[in-house]
Amino acid sequence: MSTQEHPSPRDWDSHSPYVYPPYRSTVLRGPTKPLVPLKAALSDLAAPVYGQDDLGELDHDLTRNARRNGEPLGERIIVTGRVTDERGRPVRDTLVEIWQANAAGRYIHKVDRHDAPIDPNFLGAGRCLTDAQGRYRFVSIKPGAYPWGNHPNAWRPNHIHFSLFGQHLAARLVTQMYFPGDPLLALDPIFQGTPAAARERLVSRFSIDVTQPDVALGYEFDIVLRGPDETPMER
Amino acid sequence: MSAIPPPGQERLGQTLGQTPSQTVGPYFAYGLTPEQYGYPFRSLFGPRLAQPDAPGEHIRLHGQVLDGAGNPVDDALVELFQVDAQGARVANGQQVSTTGFTGFTGFGRCGTGTDAHKRFEFLTVKPGAVRPGAAPYVDLIVMMRGMLVHAFTRVWFDDEAAANERDPVLQSVPAERRATVLARREQTPAGTAYRFDIRMQGPQETVFFDL
């Protein structure tokens, strides 16, 4: 991004408010005062870039990057999609990091006390860089749903956490990808915190084209980041 | 469902909706800060931005993330983004490989779940001025369970009063709230430190910027 280009503004119609009481822990953790606009010196904030050398060979394959004595259990999935800006231009060479629960709905994280089995051959973390078309691709295990303490009988829908950088610090995005048809989505205050018109952007779509015969089901999840806010000149 | 047109099939002037933000949740550590928390996965970023031989004044930047009840949060993730001691942006997030050895990387991460006092602590150098006479600063992103959207703030240094007076961004902050974005210099047996607490709510709520 050149020094003349500023990122497009955050579209608050696409994002949750900081405080969304149905998701209880927002009440004491979300900022309550108005944000101060930061327009000056934005050109100083081009995000750092990463090289393929920084990543391990199996970092993108969660079914292989933590094996100890066999394959992880569960339904194998391929998760792929394109990362673009709001005008559909690919965001190339950007780092995509994911983390998730195992097939039983258990996180390897030490704080997770859910009484479901840990899979010794599954860590649940991965990362890759987008290619020249902005495409990323992971191989993983479909994560299970799990209970949490937000309200009585609360369960999180199946989801995969995503972290992306984009070309500018303003494009930084941490989000979650969901699966189509999950009945828990309608009951999940984290998903429901997103304005209704934008929610479906968080739901991946099943793709028989991405599905690999005899190996894994395919899901596509495209991600749109904030990009340069200039009038497009090409074509 | 999002459906980005394939390359070459974009329509002129078409605008795609931004993918909504969701919470980082309580279990980010093995994905985003694995080495700090002892998980068997290599960290791309950690709390150390400056190696001991990096040029500049070595500092620790540390603090707590406090919720609206004043309690320190033990599952927050703080990301630090800054220029080096000469005021230059490190182009490569993994430091040395393309630009020659500087011993410095411009981006770090620290979770608040491994310190007895629930602090984050970065080992870095005091950033230089990006332009002659400009006030030095670092940028912080904070995210945690209970935040559906991360928050962005900028931190200035309390021993740079003259330069801070001229900083247009800091001066755009209401005067009565400026103290919330100043890191306080401390001399400790371990060297120079700056303390910066992030208050999510309350009368002293940290100024967060709409970046």
Image (cartoon, rainbow, N blue to C red):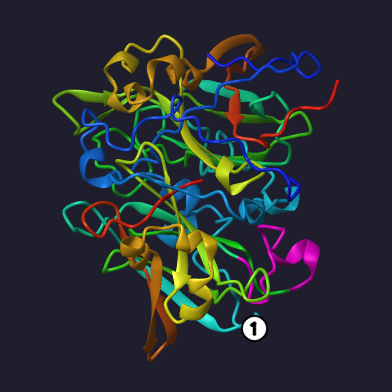
Q: Amino acid at mark 1?
A: Asp
Which residue corresponds to the image point at 47% horizontal and 28% vertical from the top-left? B20
Element marked by disc 1: loop
Which residue corresponds to the image point at 45% horizontal and 33% vertical from the top-left? B21
Which residue corresponds to the image point at 37% horizontal and 55% vertical from the top-left? B207
| Quarter-of-image position of residue B89 | bottom right
Q: Is residue A141 above or below residue B179?
A: above
Viewer-proximal residue among B171 and A203: B171
| Residue A161 appears in the picture as rendered | no
**Residue under mark 1: which chain is it in?**
B
| Image coords of residue A165 (percent x, y) | 59, 43
Q: Main secondary structure of the magenta part?
A: loop
Q: Which residue is mark 1?
A: B53
| Image coords of residue B64 (percent x, y) | 31, 64
Return the residue found at the far bottom.
B189
Viewer-proximal residue among A201 and A14: A14
| Quarter-of-image position of residue B185 | bottom left
Q: Is residue B154 above or below residue A23?
A: below
| Image coords of residue B199 (percent x, y) | 29, 58
| Residue B135 appears in the picture as rendered | yes
Which residue corresponds to the image point at 73% horizontal and 29% vertical from the top-left? A231
> Mark 1, residues whose alpha carbon is within 10 Å: few (<14), some, or many (≥20)?
few
Viewer-proximal residue among B52 and B179: B179
Q: How many marks?
A: 1
| Image coords of residue B45 (percent x, y) | 56, 58
Span colored in magenta: B83-101
